[in-house]
Each structure stands twice: as structure tokens, then as C-alpha cells.
Image (spheres, rainbow, N blue to C red):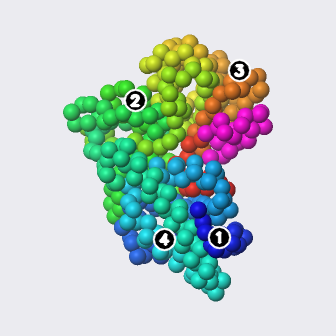
Amino acid sequence: MLSPSARPFIEASVPVLRTQGVAITQRFYASLFSAHPELKNLFNMGNQENGAQQGALAAAVLAYAANIDQPAALLPVIERIAHKHASVGIVPSQYPIVGRHLIGAIKDVLGEAATPELLSAWDEAYWLLAGELIAAEARLYERAAVSAGDLRELVVTKVVREGRQVVSYYLQTRSGRSPGPFVPGQYVSVAVDLPSRGLRQLRQYSLSDAPSRPHWRITVKSELAREDAPAGEVSNHLHAHLKQGSTLLVSAPFGNFAPLGSDHAAQSPLVLLSAGVGITPFVSALNALVEQRSTRPVLFVHAAQSREQHILGGDVRAAEQALTDLRTLTFHEQTSGDDERAGVRSGLMTLTPELLAPFAEADVYLCGPLPFMRAQWRDLIALGFSPTRLSREVFGPELLDQLS
């Protein structure tokens, strides 16, 4: 718990962070990478270059200051960040480095306003958070039976094109076995050496098949450059270079997004809402339910831009045939005659009281682009769902700003 002497300084920082937060995080990253360029291997440098990471960290620091005495609000975000840190191999010795440069950035940007008392308060607040993360990450490494930064070399045994810009890669050990158990909804980090940067970069991809299969499967969208985001360097590298017989460095599974919960035999109603490549963790869950011969009531609603960009449809159709109480609904922004004959709805995903009435007590999971999840979250709240029954998966800079 934050000391009484430090609390007023943290609370007084909130208005300052609203105006100076991004300047602080920009200074922080510049100072950190200048002194420790090796740490660039742990960060998405594309997000650094377009400013997304700096903005997200500024939002996170602000949210932390505003919620410093609300552990119920902080703990879910701490858990999510701990899983991400474990997936990229963060170690305790890196926390003093980060803390030193963060406090230094606050001092540099605020100048005379950064009094010794203020800096001491932020040092205390930082180490409270760091201590929580270090402990959580240690538990995750122990549970996964790995050391920080461990990566396994897996063999690509099959490559399947799923649709425009999307490819699935099937991964096994050299002995032709599954790399190991995981929970539907979890992800792995994939490491790729990028000669153009002279760096190794890691990205996270959800496992997209049932845990009991003799392989792991990741389904990767090649991210093209947009006005608001650079091209996906790792995804494009995988599409260009990974083929059957290639090897890939992969972490243990991490992530606390678990659509089936801890009890896979549960019979409570379940709602899965996805868009685009966000379908991947839910296909893993559906395939697991098929193998369990589950009779659990499930509503699965998916949105895609078009039929050509609707991926993993074969898995969903197989689940429809196998599961007795699965209801599916599909939305395409651009529809065709084939879509209309198949019952696909036109436009963005729209949730209605009639659709959700049988699932009023369900747990609801969302995965897809952040604007999609925000829109569905708002609609679900308006339809009477409690936020405590809603969960969403995020991977990028938005990982840090869930309290803002």
C-alpha cells in the first residue's frame, strides 16, 4: 500500500499527467533505448515509431495514478501485463533500469515542479507496481516450467491459406508431437530476426486449434500499412519466408483470456463475439467443445469485411454440425448473393435484445479490433449486461490503457 506521505503527491500528479504524460513517456523511451539498445528486442518498434506505445504508456501511468488506491481496478490489468511480460521474457533485473529512466523522464519533463518529494513518491509507487509484476511473472514462469525468455524451436508441418492476407501455420516438435498443453484463448510469442533492423522482434498470436490436437496452430494476418499504422513487419516476414519444413522460435503459452473458464465441463451459457482475425481464440474454444461433446449453450457471432476475408469458416461449420446447442450468426460489411442465401447479415455487428435474451446470464467474451470491442462493450452494457461478465482480449499498446 502506498504510504500516507506519498499519496498526496501521486494524487496531485493526475492533472499534470493529463497534459504532460506523452512528453514524459517519449522522453522515457528515448532515454531507455539510448542507454540500453538491447531492450529494443523486447518492444514492438513499429509501435514506437508511430507513437502508439508512448501514448498507451502515458494513459497507463495516468490510470495507475488515478486508481492507486483501487486494487480491484488495478489487479486485472496487472495480471494481463504480467502474462505479456512473461511471453517476451521480462526478468526482475530489468525493473530497476525501467524505474530509473521513468523517474528520470519525470524529472526532465517537469523540471522544477519535480520536487524531491514528488520523485520519491513516484519511486515508491513504481516499486509497488514492479513488485506485483515481478511476483506475478515468477508464478507464471514456474507454472509454465520455463525460465524467462525460453523459446522452443518448432517445425512448420503445414501451411494453409485461410483467406485474403491470412495464413495458418501448424507447428510440431521435431519428433512430430504437440508442443504441449494450453488453455483455449492463450497465445504464444513468435520471435523473428529482422535483418533490416538488426533486431529480433516478438509478436503474440492466439493458438487457434483445440489443445488436444497433435500440433499447435497459429493463424496470422499479414498487416498492410494504413494511414494510422505501419505495416506488420513480423506478420509480413512470416508470410514471405515461412513454409512447410521451416522452423520457428516460439514461447510457452501465456494469457489469461479463457473463454471456457477454468472448468471446461461447465454448462453455463457462453457468448463469443469476434471480428476479423479475432476469431482465432474462439475457434480454439469451439474445437475444444466439439472434442468434449459439450452440450453447453453457446452463441457465436462473428463479423468480417467480406466473404473473402472470413477465415476459419470450416472449423465453425464443423462445430455447428457437432454441437447440439451452438447458435451462430455472421455479419459481413460487404455482402453478396451467396451471403444472403447463407443467412449472413449485412453491415456491422448489431446485437439485439431478442438475440441475447436466452443468454442474459451468460459470460461474454470479445476479441477483435479495439473499436469493434469498444462498440460491442457499450452495446452490451446498454442491453443490461454487467461489466463483471464481460471479458476482452488485447495484444498491442491497448494492453496498457484498460483503466483509462
Q: Mark 2 or 4 closer to N-term? A: 4
The residue identified by callout 1 is 4
Amino acid type at image mark 4 = Gly
The residue identified by callout 3 is 358
Residue 99 numbered tag: 4
Q: Mark 1 or 3 closer to N-term? A: 1
User: Residue at 48% of width from left, 61% of height from top?
Assistant: 131
Q: Is 170 placed above or below 402 here?
A: above
Q: Nearer the viewer, residue 225 or 312?
A: 312
In three-dimensional space, the C-alpha distance between marks 4 and 3, rounded to whole angstroms, equals: 49 Å
In three-dimensional space, the C-alpha distance between marks 1 and 3, rounded to whole angstroms, equals: 49 Å
The residue identified by callout 2 is 211
- In magenta, the rendered stretch is 370-391
Q: Nearer the viewer, mark 4 or mark 3?
A: 4
Residue 351 numbered tag: none
Q: Secondary structure at mark 4?
A: helix
Q: Mark 1 or 4 closer to N-term? A: 1
Q: Nearer the viewer, residue 320 or 339?
A: 320
In contact (CB < 8 Å): disc 1 and disc 4 = no
